[in-house]
Image (cartoon, rainbow, N blue to C red):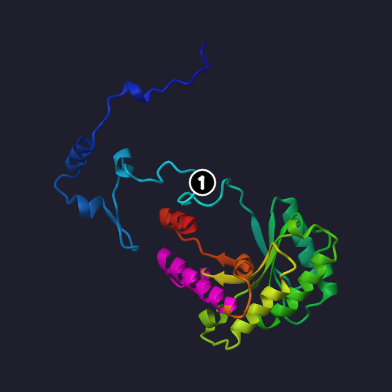
Amino acid sequence: MSNQKEKLFTDFPPVSTEEWMEVINKDLKGADFQKRLVWKTNEGFNVNPFYRAENIEGFSSAGNLPGQFPYVRSTRKDNVWYVRQDIDVNDYADANRKALSLLDKGVTSLGFHLPKNDLSAENLKVLLNGIAPDKVELNFRTCISKTHELARLVVAYVTSQNLDLLRCFGSIEYDPFRKILKKGVDVPNWMDDAAEMVKITASLPRYRSISITGNLLNDAGAYSYQELGFSLSYANQLLGALIGKGLAPSLVAKKIKFELGVGSNYFMEIAKFRA
């Protein structure tokens, strides 16, 4: 018996677009095709109920693979994702036990939300006991007024572990616009604060220290294109401001991370993350 898989589609006669439309219009029984079946998206373009190979004829990127320019199928060549779980830290030893339990269950990325009142090197050591910074993505967040202190503690801890720093990855999540977005409160020294965050974490090449929290826009009801557009605008403003402070563009770009929300609009969400 042959192990070759048979291609059965050639046994069926091809169906033209005109034939499809004839059947669709018959099923609609006089109803308007545009009104009933064409999706008018909030993003400003229409989506037909079906597409065929002829619809992508002439697209230069139609045959591109993931990781190939112009990256219409993502910049990634693989589909490796981190599985993240956040932990609100009220007791450092208890949070450590929760983290270790989560790692045993398959989590590959941890997010720690730390209180502002008891940040210390000793507490951080308790929190990360038994957790390898070069094996697990570690993310930290605290009150914006204490973020620089937290960053110094994290940098000191990671660099003291005698590990290859290129294998240590994570973030200290500082967003200069978060307070403005959530509370409408201005942060006049945000450029200086952001520049300081980049400098503090410069010794950890795979730690990002500037966070663009576009998910706040998503939570407020922004459409996919609005969330993406405003987030990129924030990042552009940050990049320009920090370059103006004398920081290298390549350093700043590697320190910025995006946090985007995920809504129920399946295709638009995929397009947003690919963009």
Q: Is residue 81 above or below residue 141?
A: above
- How many numbered circles are shown? 1
The answer to whether residue 239 is magenta is yes
Viewer-proximal residue, 227 or 202? 202
Q: Percent from the top left, x then y, of residue 5?
A: 48, 21
Residue with the most extreme top position:
1
Judge left or right: residue 248 versus residue 203.
left
Residue drawn at x 72%, y 56% is 102
Q: Give the residue number, with chain letter if any, for mark 1.
A: 66
Give amino acid for label 1. Answer: Pro
Residue drawn at x 65%, y 58% is 84
Q: Quadrant of residue 213?
A: bottom right
Query: Which stretch did the figure color magenta?
Result: 215-243
Q: Percent from the top left, x then y, of residue 229?
A: 44, 68
The answer to whether residue 30 is magenta is no
Q: Percent from the top left, x then y, of residue 236?
A: 51, 72
Residue with the most extreme left position:
30
Q: Percent from the top left, x then y, of residue 262?
A: 50, 61
SS class, disc 1: loop
Judge left or right: residue 96 versus residue 147.
right
